[in-house]
Image (cartoon, helix red, strand yellow):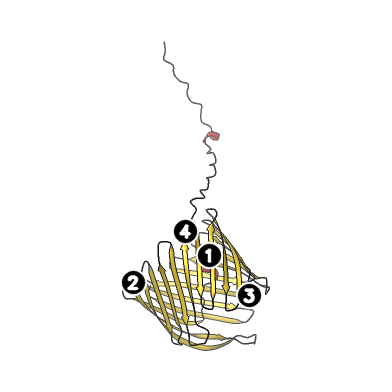
Amino acid sequence: MAALVPPPPPPTTAADTTQKPKEDEKVDYFNLPCPIPYEEIHREALMSLKPELFEGMRFDFTKGLNQRFSLSHSVFMGPMEVPSQSPETIKIPTAHYEFGANFIDPKLMLFGRIMTDGRLNARVKCDLSENLTLKANSQLTNEPHMSHGMVNFDYKGKDYRSQFQLGNGALFGANYIQSVTPHLSLGGEVFWAGQHRKSGIGYAARYNTDKMVATGQVASTGMVALSYVQKVSEKVSLASDFMYNYMSRDVTASFGYDYILRQCRLRGKIDSNGTVAAFLEERLNMGLNFVLSAEIDHRKKDYKFGFGLTVGE
Protein backbone atom coordinates (compact mmCIF):
# COMPACT_ATOMS: atom_id res chain seq x y z
CA MET A 1 0.00 0.00 0.00
CA ALA A 2 1.44 3.34 -1.07
CA ALA A 3 2.38 5.80 1.63
CA LEU A 4 -0.06 8.63 2.15
CA VAL A 5 1.47 11.89 0.96
CA PRO A 6 -0.07 15.09 2.39
CA PRO A 7 -1.41 17.45 -0.24
CA PRO A 8 0.81 20.46 -1.09
CA PRO A 9 -0.06 23.75 0.59
CA PRO A 10 -2.19 26.16 -1.41
CA PRO A 11 -0.27 28.75 -3.43
CA THR A 12 0.53 31.99 -1.66
CA THR A 13 -1.31 35.02 -2.97
CA ALA A 14 -0.49 38.69 -2.66
CA ALA A 15 -3.37 39.14 -0.27
CA ASP A 16 -1.87 36.55 2.08
CA THR A 17 1.52 38.28 2.12
CA THR A 18 0.01 41.54 3.21
CA GLN A 19 0.77 42.06 6.86
CA LYS A 20 -2.20 42.49 9.09
CA PRO A 21 -2.32 45.71 11.06
CA LYS A 22 -0.92 45.34 14.52
CA GLU A 23 -3.32 45.66 17.36
CA ASP A 24 -2.98 48.77 19.47
CA GLU A 25 -0.54 48.20 22.24
CA LYS A 26 -2.10 48.42 25.65
CA VAL A 27 -0.94 51.29 27.82
CA ASP A 28 0.66 50.30 31.10
CA TYR A 29 -0.61 53.05 33.39
CA PHE A 30 1.56 51.72 36.20
CA ASN A 31 4.74 52.35 34.18
CA LEU A 32 4.33 55.86 32.76
CA PRO A 33 7.36 58.09 32.06
CA CYS A 34 8.32 60.87 34.45
CA PRO A 35 7.29 64.30 33.09
CA ILE A 36 9.58 67.30 32.85
CA PRO A 37 9.41 69.93 35.62
CA TYR A 38 6.32 72.14 35.69
CA GLU A 39 8.27 75.36 35.10
CA GLU A 40 9.94 73.86 31.99
CA ILE A 41 6.88 72.75 30.02
CA HIS A 42 7.58 75.42 27.35
CA ARG A 43 11.33 74.79 27.14
CA GLU A 44 11.41 73.60 23.50
CA ALA A 45 9.52 76.70 22.35
CA LEU A 46 11.66 79.01 24.49
CA MET A 47 14.84 77.63 22.93
CA SER A 48 13.69 78.91 19.52
CA LEU A 49 11.63 81.97 20.47
CA LYS A 50 13.64 83.34 23.43
CA PRO A 51 17.36 83.30 22.55
CA GLU A 52 19.73 85.30 24.74
CA LEU A 53 19.63 88.49 22.67
CA PHE A 54 21.92 91.39 23.59
CA GLU A 55 23.14 94.72 22.24
CA GLY A 56 26.76 95.80 22.10
CA MET A 57 29.93 93.77 22.64
CA ARG A 58 30.34 90.77 24.94
CA PHE A 59 33.39 88.69 25.79
CA ASP A 60 33.21 85.57 27.99
CA PHE A 61 36.21 83.56 29.15
CA THR A 62 36.06 80.40 31.26
CA LYS A 63 39.14 78.72 32.68
CA GLY A 64 38.93 75.28 34.27
CA LEU A 65 41.30 74.82 37.20
CA ASN A 66 40.44 71.14 37.67
CA GLN A 67 37.61 68.75 36.86
CA ARG A 68 35.23 70.41 39.33
CA PHE A 69 36.30 74.02 39.77
CA SER A 70 36.45 76.78 37.16
CA LEU A 71 36.62 80.59 36.98
CA SER A 72 34.85 82.85 34.50
CA HIS A 73 35.34 86.43 33.34
CA SER A 74 32.80 88.45 31.37
CA VAL A 75 33.08 91.92 29.84
CA PHE A 76 30.09 93.73 28.37
CA MET A 77 29.95 97.11 26.64
CA GLY A 78 26.73 98.43 25.18
CA PRO A 79 23.76 100.73 25.66
CA MET A 80 21.20 100.36 28.43
CA GLU A 81 17.56 101.38 28.03
CA VAL A 82 16.24 104.02 30.44
CA PRO A 83 12.53 104.02 31.35
CA SER A 84 10.74 107.12 30.07
CA GLN A 85 7.26 108.33 29.19
CA SER A 86 8.40 109.17 25.66
CA PRO A 87 7.45 106.72 22.89
CA GLU A 88 11.07 106.78 21.73
CA THR A 89 13.60 104.49 23.42
CA ILE A 90 16.27 106.30 25.43
CA LYS A 91 19.65 104.59 25.79
CA ILE A 92 22.81 105.41 27.70
CA PRO A 93 26.22 103.77 27.18
CA THR A 94 27.31 101.36 29.89
CA ALA A 95 30.08 98.86 30.56
CA HIS A 96 30.65 96.33 33.30
CA TYR A 97 32.86 93.41 34.27
CA GLU A 98 31.65 90.20 35.90
CA PHE A 99 33.73 87.65 37.79
CA GLY A 100 32.41 84.17 38.47
CA ALA A 101 33.36 80.96 40.22
CA ASN A 102 31.82 77.55 39.50
CA PHE A 103 31.95 74.26 41.37
CA ILE A 104 30.35 71.27 39.64
CA ASP A 105 30.02 67.89 41.30
CA PRO A 106 27.61 65.05 40.45
CA LYS A 107 25.54 65.88 43.54
CA LEU A 108 26.42 69.51 44.21
CA MET A 109 26.70 72.57 41.96
CA LEU A 110 27.66 76.07 43.12
CA PHE A 111 27.68 79.19 40.95
CA GLY A 112 28.66 82.70 42.02
CA ARG A 113 28.82 85.98 40.10
CA ILE A 114 29.86 89.47 41.21
CA MET A 115 29.67 92.59 39.04
CA THR A 116 31.39 95.96 39.16
CA ASP A 117 28.11 97.69 40.09
CA GLY A 118 28.00 95.71 43.35
CA ARG A 119 25.45 93.05 42.44
CA LEU A 120 26.14 89.54 43.71
CA ASN A 121 24.34 86.49 42.31
CA ALA A 122 24.56 82.99 43.77
CA ARG A 123 22.96 79.67 42.81
CA VAL A 124 23.05 76.29 44.52
CA LYS A 125 21.79 72.88 43.41
CA CYS A 126 22.18 69.95 45.79
CA ASP A 127 20.82 66.41 45.46
CA LEU A 128 19.70 65.56 48.98
CA SER A 129 18.64 62.08 47.88
CA GLU A 130 17.95 60.17 44.70
CA ASN A 131 14.55 61.84 44.34
CA LEU A 132 14.83 65.08 46.35
CA THR A 133 16.78 68.13 45.11
CA LEU A 134 17.40 71.47 46.77
CA LYS A 135 17.75 74.58 44.59
CA ALA A 136 18.48 78.07 45.86
CA ASN A 137 19.25 81.38 44.18
CA SER A 138 19.75 84.89 45.50
CA GLN A 139 20.73 88.36 44.38
CA LEU A 140 22.24 91.00 46.64
CA THR A 141 22.41 94.63 45.54
CA ASN A 142 23.10 98.07 46.98
CA GLU A 143 19.66 99.32 45.96
CA PRO A 144 17.09 99.18 48.78
CA HIS A 145 14.37 96.52 48.55
CA MET A 146 15.93 95.02 45.40
CA SER A 147 17.72 92.05 46.98
CA HIS A 148 15.84 88.77 46.81
CA GLY A 149 16.25 85.06 47.42
CA MET A 150 14.33 81.85 46.77
CA VAL A 151 14.61 78.20 47.80
CA ASN A 152 13.01 75.31 45.90
CA PHE A 153 12.55 71.70 46.96
CA ASP A 154 12.00 69.43 43.94
CA TYR A 155 10.76 65.86 44.32
CA LYS A 156 10.91 63.45 41.37
CA GLY A 157 8.56 60.48 41.51
CA LYS A 158 8.16 57.58 39.14
CA ASP A 159 5.57 59.31 36.96
CA TYR A 160 5.17 62.72 38.59
CA ARG A 161 7.09 65.74 39.87
CA SER A 162 6.33 68.19 42.65
CA GLN A 163 7.95 71.39 43.85
CA PHE A 164 7.68 73.66 46.87
CA GLN A 165 8.95 77.25 46.72
CA LEU A 166 9.85 79.66 49.50
CA GLY A 167 11.02 83.22 48.86
CA ASN A 168 11.52 86.51 50.61
CA GLY A 169 8.52 88.78 50.97
CA ALA A 170 6.49 85.87 52.38
CA LEU A 171 6.32 84.16 49.00
CA PHE A 172 5.05 80.58 49.02
CA GLY A 173 4.38 78.39 46.00
CA ALA A 174 3.82 74.79 45.02
CA ASN A 175 3.29 72.93 41.75
CA TYR A 176 2.62 69.35 40.68
CA ILE A 177 2.68 67.63 37.29
CA GLN A 178 1.53 64.07 36.54
CA SER A 179 1.84 61.83 33.48
CA VAL A 180 -1.62 60.53 32.58
CA THR A 181 -0.61 58.79 29.34
CA PRO A 182 2.78 58.05 27.74
CA HIS A 183 2.50 61.38 25.85
CA LEU A 184 0.20 63.59 27.95
CA SER A 185 0.95 65.21 31.30
CA LEU A 186 -1.25 67.54 33.37
CA GLY A 187 -0.28 69.82 36.22
CA GLY A 188 -1.24 72.73 38.44
CA GLU A 189 0.29 75.38 40.67
CA VAL A 190 -0.64 77.71 43.53
CA PHE A 191 1.19 80.66 45.07
CA TRP A 192 0.79 83.24 47.81
CA ALA A 193 2.72 86.53 47.99
CA GLY A 194 2.18 87.73 51.54
CA GLN A 195 3.96 91.06 51.10
CA HIS A 196 1.62 92.11 48.27
CA ARG A 197 -1.41 90.17 49.54
CA LYS A 198 -1.83 88.36 46.23
CA SER A 199 -2.56 84.74 45.46
CA GLY A 200 -3.04 82.72 42.31
CA ILE A 201 -3.69 79.33 40.81
CA GLY A 202 -2.78 77.90 37.44
CA TYR A 203 -3.14 74.80 35.28
CA ALA A 204 -1.00 73.37 32.48
CA ALA A 205 -1.05 70.57 29.92
CA ARG A 206 1.71 69.17 27.73
CA TYR A 207 1.50 66.66 24.87
CA ASN A 208 4.71 65.46 23.25
CA THR A 209 5.81 62.86 20.72
CA ASP A 210 9.05 62.27 18.85
CA LYS A 211 8.06 64.89 16.25
CA MET A 212 6.09 67.57 18.12
CA VAL A 213 5.41 69.25 21.45
CA ALA A 214 2.20 71.12 22.28
CA THR A 215 1.65 72.95 25.58
CA GLY A 216 -1.05 75.07 27.16
CA GLN A 217 -1.07 77.05 30.38
CA VAL A 218 -3.64 79.28 32.09
CA ALA A 219 -3.48 81.16 35.40
CA SER A 220 -5.81 83.25 37.52
CA THR A 221 -3.46 86.21 37.06
CA GLY A 222 -4.88 86.57 33.55
CA MET A 223 -2.16 84.78 31.64
CA VAL A 224 -2.93 82.31 28.84
CA ALA A 225 0.05 80.74 27.05
CA LEU A 226 -0.01 78.27 24.15
CA SER A 227 3.01 76.90 22.30
CA TYR A 228 3.70 74.36 19.57
CA VAL A 229 7.02 72.96 18.31
CA GLN A 230 7.35 70.79 15.21
CA LYS A 231 10.55 68.85 14.61
CA VAL A 232 10.98 68.92 10.83
CA SER A 233 14.21 66.93 10.88
CA GLU A 234 17.11 66.17 13.18
CA LYS A 235 18.50 69.66 12.55
CA VAL A 236 15.45 71.86 11.94
CA SER A 237 12.63 72.77 14.32
CA LEU A 238 9.78 75.24 13.92
CA ALA A 239 8.04 76.85 16.89
CA SER A 240 5.11 79.17 17.54
CA ASP A 241 3.44 80.59 20.62
CA PHE A 242 0.43 82.66 21.62
CA MET A 243 0.35 84.85 24.73
CA TYR A 244 -2.83 86.50 25.97
CA ASN A 245 -3.65 88.42 29.14
CA TYR A 246 -7.40 88.66 29.58
CA MET A 247 -7.03 91.39 32.21
CA SER A 248 -4.86 93.83 30.26
CA ARG A 249 -6.10 92.54 26.86
CA ASP A 250 -2.54 92.23 25.57
CA VAL A 251 -2.06 89.68 22.80
CA THR A 252 1.22 88.51 21.24
CA ALA A 253 1.85 85.74 18.74
CA SER A 254 5.27 84.73 17.44
CA PHE A 255 6.84 82.25 15.05
CA GLY A 256 10.43 81.02 15.18
CA TYR A 257 12.93 78.49 13.91
CA ASP A 258 15.95 76.60 15.20
CA TYR A 259 18.47 75.39 12.60
CA ILE A 260 21.50 73.37 13.72
CA LEU A 261 24.34 73.08 11.22
CA ARG A 262 27.63 71.23 11.50
CA GLN A 263 29.48 74.06 13.27
CA CYS A 264 26.82 76.67 14.00
CA ARG A 265 23.31 77.14 15.32
CA LEU A 266 20.86 79.72 13.96
CA ARG A 267 17.70 80.78 15.76
CA GLY A 268 15.23 83.49 14.91
CA LYS A 269 11.70 84.73 15.38
CA ILE A 270 9.09 87.24 14.25
CA ASP A 271 6.12 88.35 16.33
CA SER A 272 2.86 90.24 15.95
CA ASN A 273 4.38 93.40 17.48
CA GLY A 274 6.59 93.86 14.44
CA THR A 275 9.77 92.58 16.10
CA VAL A 276 12.22 90.45 14.11
CA ALA A 277 15.21 88.81 15.80
CA ALA A 278 18.04 86.42 14.91
CA PHE A 279 20.76 84.77 16.99
CA LEU A 280 23.79 82.96 15.54
CA GLU A 281 26.34 80.82 17.39
CA GLU A 282 29.35 79.81 15.31
CA ARG A 283 32.01 77.35 16.54
CA LEU A 284 35.30 78.62 15.18
CA ASN A 285 37.46 76.09 16.97
CA MET A 286 37.43 73.81 19.98
CA GLY A 287 36.48 76.04 22.90
CA LEU A 288 36.07 79.15 20.72
CA ASN A 289 32.62 80.43 19.70
CA PHE A 290 31.51 83.56 17.86
CA VAL A 291 28.07 85.03 18.60
CA LEU A 292 25.91 87.44 16.58
CA SER A 293 22.66 88.95 17.85
CA ALA A 294 20.22 91.22 16.00
CA GLU A 295 16.76 92.55 16.82
CA ILE A 296 14.58 95.07 14.99
CA ASP A 297 11.43 96.58 16.47
CA HIS A 298 9.66 98.23 13.53
CA ARG A 299 6.91 99.74 15.68
CA LYS A 300 9.28 101.53 18.11
CA LYS A 301 11.98 102.02 15.47
CA ASP A 302 14.46 100.38 17.82
CA TYR A 303 17.42 98.54 16.30
CA LYS A 304 19.77 96.34 18.32
CA PHE A 305 22.92 94.58 17.17
CA GLY A 306 25.49 92.70 19.21
CA PHE A 307 28.48 90.47 18.73
CA GLY A 308 30.53 88.45 21.14
CA LEU A 309 33.24 85.90 21.64
CA THR A 310 33.16 82.94 24.03
CA VAL A 311 36.41 81.24 25.01
CA GLY A 312 36.45 78.03 27.03
CA GLU A 313 33.82 75.36 27.64
Q: Are the two marked residues, 1 and 3, in contact with CB atoms closer than 8 angstroms? A: no
Q: Residue extending furthest top?
A: 1
- Expressed as whole percent of the image width and height from the top left, the position of residue 31 reads 48, 51
Badge 3 crowding class, 10 Å Cα cut-off, few under 14, some 14 to 19, many 20 or more, is few
Q: Nearer the viewer, residue 242 or 36?
A: 36
Q: Residue extending furthest left?
A: 66
Q: Are the two marked residues, 1 and 2, in contact with CB atoms closer than 8 angstroms? A: no
Residue tagged 4: 157
Looking at the picture, does residue 27 appear above or below residue 313? above
Position of the C terminus, as image quadrant, is bottom left
Asked if residue 94 lies left or right of residue 83, the reply is left
Say which quarter of the image contains residue 200.
Answer: bottom right
Q: Nearer the viewer, residue 158 or 262?
A: 158
Question: Of helix, strand and loop, which one carries label 2?
Answer: loop
Badge 1 crowding class, 10 Å Cα cut-off, few under 14, some 14 to 19, many 20 or more, is many
Separation of disc 1 and disc 2 at Cα?
Answer: 29 Å
Looking at the image, tell me whether mark 3 or mark 2 is earlier in sequence order.
Answer: 2
Separation of disc 1 and disc 4 at Cα?
Answer: 13 Å
- Expressed as whole percent of the image width and height from the top left, the position of residue 295 reads 56, 77
Kindly identify the residue that appears in the image at 54 percent across and 74 percent down: 171
Instruction: Tell which tag, 3 or 2, sits nearer the viewer.
Output: 2
Residue tagged 1: 38
Question: Of helix, strand and loop, which one carries label 4?
Answer: loop
Separation of disc 3 and disc 4 at Cα?
Answer: 43 Å
For badge 1, the amino acid type reads Tyr
For badge 3, the amino acid type reads Gly
Residue tagged 2: 68
Looking at the image, tell me whether mark 1 or mark 4 is earlier in sequence order.
Answer: 1
- Expressed as whole percent of the image width and height from the top left, the position of residue 40 reads 52, 66
Badge 4 crowding class, 10 Å Cα cut-off, few under 14, some 14 to 19, many 20 or more, is some
Say which quarter of the image contains residue 111.
Answer: bottom left
Looking at the picture, does residue 121 appear above or below residue 240? below
